[in-house]
Amino acid sequence: MKVIQFLAAMTLATVPVMSGFMQSAYGRETGETYDQGTSPTVRTEFNLFDEDRGGNLILDLKPENDNVGVFFGAIENYQIGFGRLLVDEKGKVVRDSSGFALFEIPFTPEEKLFDVGNLQAELIPTYDGLEIIEYTISGTKKDGSLAQINQRIFDPCNCNFDKKRAVNDLSYILEKSLLDGTIATAAGPRVPQDIVGGILYKTGVAVRRTTVPEPSVSVPEPSATLGALAVLSAGLLLKRKMK
């Protein structure tokens, strides 16, 4: 009886371990959610990720060019709708302890322009000696063209981020939330034009499931393991009877 109890305990202990291996075939990917409008009203919303749905980093398609970065698949769920950010008595948008802008009226989507889109970053010199980093969001060829263009002024004397990485490194752009606070300078034909001149705010963490390659360790199926333990149990019992 003790042998059976021992094997039963092994079986129960083995199943969770195998379950853990099976669940590890899925990775949870996080990004950021951004809302655009003329504060405090917001009219568009999208998610920014630095990994594709396969769990692979989205790399710059033009790594040889320090002034231009192109990231296919970085934008997801670009939607048009309506929401209202929370502002204080001075009209300043209120943020939580993590730096996310808070809503007074949550964003309600009315139309999705595309599921997956692209982000382009470009460093542009200005006539007064400063530089502008321009972030362009667009859909794929199937979904449409330009969605919006946002700009951030790069002042070498007053800057706390790496200019090159702000253009060519998507993970850095996401880590530093470099789209947060940028100004919309253009909007596509299907996008509300009143977002132009407004500030882009990060409003939350975007989370989605991604499928990643299964672990290299070979893990037997639960049914096969249980069957093997059952055979081992029967063999040990038979051995005891023969004695």
Image (cartoon, rainbow, N blue to C red):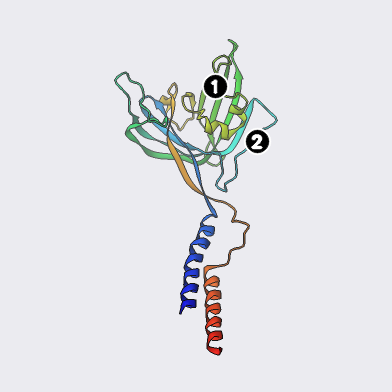
- Mark before the other along the chain sequence, 2 or 1: 2
Point out residue 157 in the picture as x, y percentages from the top left corner: 57, 14
The residue labelled by disc 1 is 160
Which quadrant holds residue 61?
A: top right
- Helix, strand or loop at label 1? It is loop
Label 2–label 1 contact, CB within 8 A: no
Q: Position of residue 79 (x, y in %)?
A: 43, 37
**Quadrant in which residue 102 is drawn:** top left
Q: How far apart are marks 2 and 1 (CA)?
A: 25 Å
- Taking the spot 60% from the left edge, 41% from the top edge, the residue there is 57
Q: Compared with residue 155, is residue 107 higher up or lower down, i.e. above or below?
A: below
Amino acid type for the residue under numbered disc 1: Asn
Q: Residue 102: in sight, yes or no? A: yes
Residue of label 2: 61
Where is residue 180? Give x, y as percent: 47, 27
- Taking the view exactly as shown, the residue that stands out farthest to the right is 64
Residue 163 sits in quarter: top right
Q: Which residue is drawn at 56% across and 75% down?
A: 228
Of residues 96 and 68, the one nearer the viewer is: 96
Q: Nearer the viewer, residue 104 or 19?
A: 19
